[in-house]
Amino acid sequence: MVLRVRLAWLRALGMMAACAASMLAVDPPPPAVAAAFSSAFVIADLPVDATGKSGVAARDAARAAAQKQALDLLLQRLTAPQDWPRLPHLTGEDVTDLVLDMEVESEHVSSSHYVGRYTFRFDPKGVRALLKQANIPFTELVSKRIVAIPLFQTPSGVHLWDDPNPWRDAWNAAHGPAGLVPWVVPLGDLGDVQSLDVADLKLPAADKLVAMSQRYDGGDIVVAAAVLQDSTSGSPTPTSGKVTVPIPVTLQITVTRYGATGTDSESTSVSGDKPDAGFYLSGVVATERMLEDLWKKVSLPSGSAAPNAGGPVVSPVGGGLSATHGGMQVEVEVPITSAADWVKLHDRITQVSGVVGTRIEVFTKDQVLLQLTLSGEPQRLALAFAQQDLALSAGPNGGAMILSPHAGSVSGTLAAPGGVPGAVPVPLAPLPSQSLGTLPVPPSSAAAAVSPSTQ
């Protein structure tokens, strides 16, 4: 059972009412609220481990340390590495005030030891204010959900849908909807097995990847291929007599991302004492952070000064924006085919990161003239709308912009990976760099394995 504690409610009540409040708060928030919450402000699958004079004392110490660690991870997620030395470091109640709620994913308490796994949701307004006060550029633009396909290689063979596949198990156990680059893992059912197999992934056909993306209503396809090294089974190695010691293991991970304009790959690695569930989960976390780092290179603000209130701003797709006290305003024409079509489009528009207000100016049977109020940087507008499968383009004669649905970053438009020998090589090897959808081409050194810190 997952326990969600709404910390804001607990603080608002007195100490005597805290227990009652926590009992009332075990249910998740209403669906409408949960759906609207940005995954950028969720830190998931955070492990905790603490000791104390009692199990309760160890638990309290673990939770206090965990929420501070979660906030530090969140601030690093939203900002560029070069700005991390300037990040604010809060403690105590200052951290608690930014936590909306906490989920206890799992926990175990003994007489003096506590271990668990938490998920935190932070207050977006409070976090934004904190970073703005520190004058640090940040992004909260969430990528369209990717479809992650875990591929596991051992000396006995390559495992995709079949078992055992502890690498795939780790992805299934992790919290895919969190972060700047949310993801979903295919079910591995008969439809998936018929769509893709190991042979397909050596040089996948575009139509098969498109079909897999559409099946899970996702964007780009990401194949996360992992090779376990230094140990074939994770069994301890005998030393003398009955004494055994574990063999350190390394998981080499190659991530190949298939987007609308081509294919590219990145590599990383994690090390541990034994290939248990926590070891493979650390590999998932390292992969998530690598994908988020790539995404930040295109989604972070450029650091240019904000426009003067009321002054014209030229958008990267043509047309003009008017800056006001409440944010930038822009007129867009939205072609529609019916009222039902408009309802669906409007839902997608309101989910675009940076859209803070909408107002209908003209509504006809085939078009809606809409005024949008936006926050954020104009240079990121087209990218933000693209994550909801909406294309923002210049209107005729510098008039209202045109906002229309499109097939998305991969669905229906995926470029064939022609010329790329072995898109997911077995055994794994670095791939030559090509363009990668909306992501930048990584530096040539990116193929070298690194060991990033885990969440």
Image (cartoon, grey):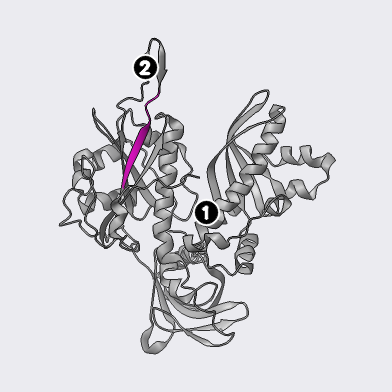
Q: Earlier in the sequence, mark 2 or mark 1?
A: 1
Q: Determine which residue is flagged by label 2.
A: 239
The residue depicted at 58 percent of the width and 87 percent of the height is 310
Q: Amino acid at mark 2?
A: Thr
Q: Determine which residue is flagged by label 1.
A: 39
Q: CA distance from mark 2 to mark 1?
A: 48 Å
Magenta span: helix, strand or loop, mainly? strand
Q: Amino acid at mark 1?
A: Ser
The residue depicted at 44 percent of the width and 75 percent of the height is 379
**Does 203 sit left or right of 3 as displayed?**
left
Q: Could one spot residue 391 in this view of the protein?
A: yes
Residue 48 numbered mark, or none: none
| Residue nearest the viewer, comparing 14 with 283 | 283
Secondary structure at numbered mark 1: helix
**Span highlighted in magenta in the image:** 246-254
Number of numbered discs present? 2
Secondary structure at numbered mark 2: strand
Mark nearer the viewer, 2 or 1: 2
